[in-house]
DNA sequence: TCTCAGGGGCGAT
DNA sequence: ATCGCCCCTGAG
């Protein structure tokens, strides 16, 4: 019997808990001192102790290349903080959520998950994502627990609306299915990573259920556009209350403003401000 | 038990 | 350019 079935790496300036359970990803849970997450082809297992990261990937083990990209380990975090610390609002947010990070999640999972986010609560989104995975995703046993991968897009494209409704997608079910069909028929995943910001946004907004805000989320959480700040109701509130922008400002103007103000790192600033104004507490998502 | 709004987007004016 | 509506759930 081997002593360790996991790896150990150095991890500095990284608050794993706040990052995994904050509003950007819906696929992480905390069991027995470990965080477990699921993508379309990986189960991820993570634990942080001081500056050590203990981790394992399944079914392909020891996939550090995957993990490194997913956790965005290769960024100059201190430089990012320095750049976005433009005012007391951001600085206070950074103080309240030290070492909060951005992830780089899978494109298709992010797209589909955020379609579910439309007029929905984070709890409901997390629930739907788990129902979908349980119903359509492959199962894998890890640590004697059953985990389910996020379903393949092909499977979701072929799903019956009634089955999607059982996953509590509600009025989003038809968008969800069409979006999955679109990803497959357009072979979008193989093209979108090469697109410019404008091209990516236009190609996303064609898809049913995706408007400006959800396109923002997909772009900054899965396509690496660090300049794109998702402009949702919370961020709008921040823009108007903290930065005195016109409440009727168009999303495109707001994007231009934040792009300039945060020097191309609006996604990072947005993550701090978002958690700050909504008073995020990771504990709420950690239960038995 | 009941009301209400939630990380928006769509379709009708 | 505005505006009502959408499924469902947890919170109050």
Image: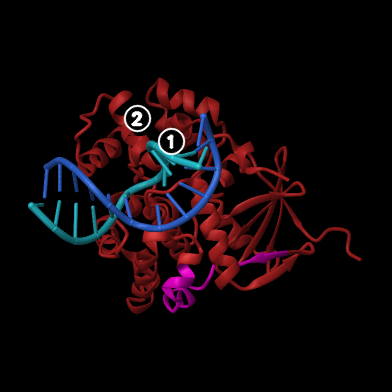
Chain colours: A red, B cyan, C blue
Can the viewer see residue A15 in this picture?
no
Asked if the residue under mark 2 is in contact with the one under mark 1, i.e. CB atoms within 8 Å, the reply is yes
The range drawn in magenta is: A146-164
Q: What residue is rendered at 69% in x and 70% in y?
A: A140
Q: Quadrant of residue A174?
A: bottom left
Q: Nearer the viewer, residue A111 or A44?
A: A111
Q: Nearer the viewer, residue A73 or A252?
A: A252
Mark 1 and mark 2 lie on one chain; the one further toward the N terminus is 2
Q: Quadrant of residue A64?
A: bottom right
Image mark 2: chain: A
Mark 1 crowd level (few <14, some 14–19, many ≥20, 10 Å Cα) = many
Q: Tag on residue A238?
A: 2
Left or right position of A138 against A32 = left
* Residue A207 drawn at (x, y percent): 29, 65
Numbered disc 1: secondary structure:
helix
Depicted A33 relative to depicted A97: above or below = below
Q: Which residue is mark 1?
A: A274
> CA separation, marks 1 and 2?
8 Å
Where, quadrant-wise, is the N terminus of chain A in this rendering?
A: bottom right
Q: Is residue A189 magenta?
A: no
Q: Quadrant of residue A231?
A: top left
Depicted A90 relative to depicted A206: above or below = above
- Looking at the rendered structure, whether the residues under marks 1 and 2 are on a common chain is answered as yes
Q: Nearer the viewer, residue A78 or A248?
A: A248
* Residue A188 drawn at (x, y percent): 35, 71
Depicted A68 relative to depicted A98: above or below = below
* Residue A195 drawn at (x, y percent): 30, 63
Left or right position of B10 against A272 = left
Mark 2 crowd level (few <14, some 14–19, many ≥20, 10 Å Cα) = many
* Residue A31 drawn at (x, y percent): 73, 50
Can the viewer see residue A77 in this picture?
yes
């Amino acid at each position: 019997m081997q002593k360790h079935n996991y790896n150990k790496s150095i991890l500095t300036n990284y608050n794993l808990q706040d990052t995994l359970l904050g509003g950007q990803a819906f696929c992480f849970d905390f069991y027995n001192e470990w965080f477990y997450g699921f993508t379309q082809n990986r189960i991820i297992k993570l634990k942080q102790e001081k500056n050590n990261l203990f981790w394992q990937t399944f079914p392909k083990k020891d996939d550090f290349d995957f993990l490194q990209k997913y956790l965005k380990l290769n960024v100059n975090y201190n430089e990012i903080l320095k750049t976005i610390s433009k005012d007391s609002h951001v600085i206070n947010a950074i103080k309240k959520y030290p070492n909060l990070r951005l992830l780089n999640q899978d494109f298709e999972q992010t797209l589909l998950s955020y379609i579910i986010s439309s007029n929905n609560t984070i709890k409901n989104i997390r629930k739907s994502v788990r129902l979908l995975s349980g119903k359509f995703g492959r199962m894998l046993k890890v640590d004697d627990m059953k985990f389910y991968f996020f379903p393949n897009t092909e499977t979701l494209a072929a799903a019956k609306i009634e089955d999607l409704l059982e996953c509590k997608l509600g009025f989003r079910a038809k968008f969800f299915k069409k979006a999955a069909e679109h990803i497959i028929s357009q072979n979008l995943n193989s093209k979108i990573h090469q697109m410019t910001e404008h091209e990516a946004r236009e190609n996303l907004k064609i898809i049913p259920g995706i408007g400006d805000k959800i396109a923002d989320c997909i772009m900054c959480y899965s396509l690496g556009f660090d300049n794109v700040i998702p402009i949702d109701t919370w961020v709008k509130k921040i823009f108007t209350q903290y930065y005195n922008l016109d409440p009727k400002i168009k999303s495109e103007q707001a994007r231009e403003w934040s792009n300039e103000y945060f020097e191309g790192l609006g996604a990072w600033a947005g993550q701090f401000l978002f958690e700050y104004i909504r008073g995020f507490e990771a504990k709420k998502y950690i239960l038995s």
